[in-house]
Each structure stands twice: as C-alpha cells, then as structure tokens.
Image (spheres, rainbow, N blue to C red):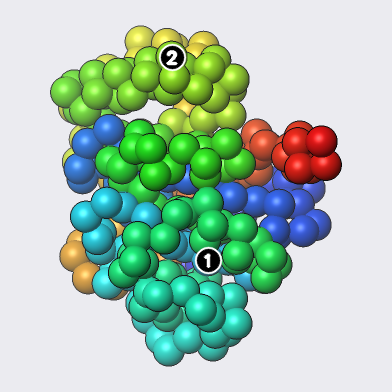
C-alpha cells in the first residue's frame, strides 16, 4: 500500500516558509489533531521541512499521538520550551509550550528556519491568543459528521465572519470527519451551504487506524484517508495568505 500523500502538481510553494496552517474546531473530538498530523504528513511527502505544533489551551495530545523517534533536525525548533520529536512521516512534532508562548512568535521563528508550520489549536482557535496567527495562516476548521457538532461549526464560522470579516471565510477550509463506517445523516444540504461560504469542504472517511488510540502512523492509513489529507493540504496551499501585504505593512 502506498504511504505517499499526493499533493496536486504545482500546488506546493517553492519556499516552505510561506505556508502556515491553523487547525481548529468548535468542539472536542472533532479530529483537529489527526487533521493536523495528516496535513503535516502531506507536506512532508515532497521532502519539505514541516513542524506540527500544539497550541491548544489545555495541553492537547498532539505530541503523544505523533512522537515516533528522536528528533533528527533539532535546529528547526531549538530554543522553544516544549518537547519535540520526529513523526512517522518525517515532519517534526512540537508539544505545547510550557510558557504559553504567543503562537505568532512560534510561527515566525520556525518560518525563519525555512519550515512550513501546521498548528493544532483545537477549541482554542477562537481565543485572543491566536488572533495574530489567524492573520497570517490558512484556517482549517474541523467537525465530525453529526448534527450537534455541525451546528457548532456553523456558529464558529459565523463568529469568524463577524469578528475577522468575510475575507476570513474565503481562506478557510472545512474538514468533515466520519467517525462511523456508515453514513449517519444526509450531508447534501450541509455541503451545499458550506461550499457557498468557504474556500473548500473536504470529507475524511472513517479510518480505524486514525481513530485508534496511540501513535498516529500515516503508513497505516487507508488510501482514501491519505488522499483526503492530500486534498486538505492542497486546498490550504491554494488559499494561503499572500506574504506581500505583511511586508507592505512592515515597511510602512
């Protein structure tokens, strides 16, 4: 079985430092951590240096889910007060910073070292701590396919538009994760509404390997899951914020 996660040809930037992705959710158990690791694995496939970092408010389990081997490239995350390790895909995983460092500062530091960044904010994505990072990152919002979580997803999208402006939704990718092998509801009206509002909507099929506790090993995922994470990464690349506007602001 192939363990290469395909990106759309030509979608990857020549400079990995150009890419920052912020993954969040409106509820716990939405798949934000597995989505973060799936995106990181997809970006690492073309041999990009990639760091997946935990910026949740409660010390999430990104590090314990992904740490597979001792760190081989310590310079990417040196100086950050958090545990780090290699994942099965070759991406680096960075645990939650003990001193609650501003995620935007972590983003800038790792970018200066030439690596792409994927942040797992979980339900903290709406907090003031992530405001700076939201300005420079593609936003990926996750929900499981159930009625109540989808309602919460609509609420968080509404807040995003109200607080950050409609442009926020234009660079937001929605991920819908199936937690059961068989469909539990008709997604047709949900998909229709979401596709009118956001940049892209991608479904991740049920995968027992991803749902299992313990190490997230991308090599154990089904081909349909690998393909879904590749599509999410490609969508995030397609709507990444331009670096020109921040440069103009800095030079003003």
Percent of width and height locating residue 151: 24, 19
Q: CA distance from mark 1 to mark 2?
A: 30 Å
Residue that mark 2 sits on: 162
- Furthest residue in direction front, as rendered: 252
Q: Residues within 10 Å of mark 2 (few under 14, many from 20)?
A: few
SS for callout 2:
helix
Q: Quadrant of residue 192?
A: top left
Residue at 46% x, 74% y is 80
Percent of width and height locating residue 201: 47, 28
Nearest to the observer: residue 190 or residue 184: 190
Q: Is residue 28 left or right of residue 164?
A: left
Residue at 73% x, 39% y is 246
Q: Is residue 129 left or right of residue 118?
A: left
Q: Quadrant of residue 65?
A: bottom left
Residue that mark 1 sits on: 51
SS for callout 1:
strand
Percent of width and height locating residue 57: 27, 51
Residue at 52% x, 51% y is 104
Circle 1 or circle 2, nearest the eye: 2
Nearest to the observer: residue 117 or residue 145: 117
Is 121 located above or below residue 47 in the figure? above
Return the disc, 1 or 2, that comes first in the chain's sequence.
1
Number of numbered markers: 2
- Quadrant holding the C terminus: top right
Percent of width and height locating residue 73: 58, 84
């Amino acid at each position: 079985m192939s363990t290469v996660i395909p990106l759309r040809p030509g979608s990857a930037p020549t400079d990995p430092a150009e890419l920052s992705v912020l993954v969040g959710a409106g509820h716990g158990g939405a798949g934000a951590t597995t989505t973060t690791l799936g995106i990181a694995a997809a970006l690492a496939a073309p041999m990009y240096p990639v760091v997946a970092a935990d910026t949740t408010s409660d010390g999430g389990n990104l590090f314990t889910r992904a740490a597979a081997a001792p760190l081989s490239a310590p310079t990417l995350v040196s100086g950050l007060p958090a545990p780090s390790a290699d994942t099965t895909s070759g991406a680096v995983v960075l645990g939650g910073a003990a001193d609650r460092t501003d995620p935007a500062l972590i983003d800038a530091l790792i970018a200066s070292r030439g690596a792409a960044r994927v942040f797992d904010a979980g339900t903290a994505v709406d907090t003031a701590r992530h405001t700076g990072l939201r300005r420079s990152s593609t936003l990926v919002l996750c929900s499981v396919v159930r009625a109540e979580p989808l309602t919460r997803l609509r609420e968080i999208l509404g807040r995003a538009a109200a607080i950050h402006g409609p442009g926020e939704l234009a660079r937001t990718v929605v991920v819908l994760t199936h937690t059961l092998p068989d469909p539990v509801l008709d997604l047709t009206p949900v998909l229709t509404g979401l596709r009118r509002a956001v940049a892209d909507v991608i479904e991740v099929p049920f995968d027992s390997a991803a749902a299992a506790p313990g190490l997230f090993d991308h090599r154990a995922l089904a081909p349909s899951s690998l393909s879904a994470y590749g599509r999410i990464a490609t969508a995030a690349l397609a709507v990444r914020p331009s670096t020109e506007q921040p440069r103009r602001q800095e030079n003003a």
